[in-house]
Image (spheres, grey):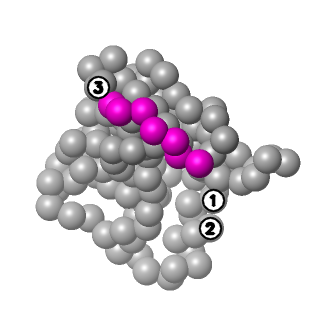
Amino acid sequence: MIDKTETQLVMMTPSATEKVRELLEQEGDTTLGLRIFVAGGGCSGMQYGMTLDEAQDGDVTLDLDGIKIFVDEMSAGYIEGSEVDYVDSLMGAGFTVNNPNAVSTCGCGHSFKTANDAGQARSCGCGH
C-alpha cells in the first residue's frame, strides 16, 4: 500500500463525508473504505466509479476525517486534485466528482475526458 499524505489526491465535501460515513456504518465492517476509480466508458470517454471495498496491493490510501479512501495507481493520475461531493436535489441524489483535470464532462457529472486522453465518446444514458 502506498501512503499518499504529502499531497492531497482527493478531497471530500462535508456532505460526501457524512454520506460515506453513513454507508460504512450500515456495513459495520471496519476494514472497508471508499474506493474511487476511473474506467473507460461514459459519454465523455472515461467514467468515475465508487464502491465500498478493502485495500488492495498497490493502492494509494488516504484517511479523510476518519474515512479510508482507496485509489488504484492508474486512477490516481486521472483524479488527482479532485473533490468528491454528495448532492441531494430534485433531480436525484448521488456522488459527483469535480475534477480539475477534466477538459470536458458530461452533464451528469459521472463522465469526463482529460487533455491527454482521447477517449471514445459514447452514450451513458444520462440524457446529456
Is residue 54 left or right of 111 when viewed as pictured?
left
Give me the residue at 21% from left, 42% from top: 74
Marking on residue 19:
1
Q: Dot 3, crowdedness within 10 Å: few (<14), some or many (≥20)?
A: few
Q: CA distance from mark 1 to mark 3?
A: 31 Å
Please name the amino acid that badge 2 sits on.
Answer: Glu
Residue 115 versus residue 124: which sits nearer the camera? 124
Please name the amino acid that badge 3 sits on.
Answer: Asp
Marking on residue 22:
2
Residue 118 versus residue 49: which sits nearer the camera? 118
Q: Which residue is mark 3?
A: 117
Q: Position of residue 5 (x, y in %)?
A: 28, 39
Is residue 17 left or right of 55 when viewed as pictured?
right
Q: Magenta segment, which residues? A: 119-125
Give me the residue at 22% from left, 53% from top: 59
Give me the residue at 21% from left, 64% from top: 56
Q: Dot 1, crowdedness within 10 Å: few (<14), some or many (≥20)?
A: some
Q: Quadrant of residue 128?
A: top right
Q: Please identify the quadrant where the N terminus is shown.
A: bottom left
Please name the amino acid that badge 1 sits on.
Answer: Lys
Q: CA distance from mark 2 to mark 1?
A: 5 Å
Q: Is residue 34 above or below residue 32?
A: above
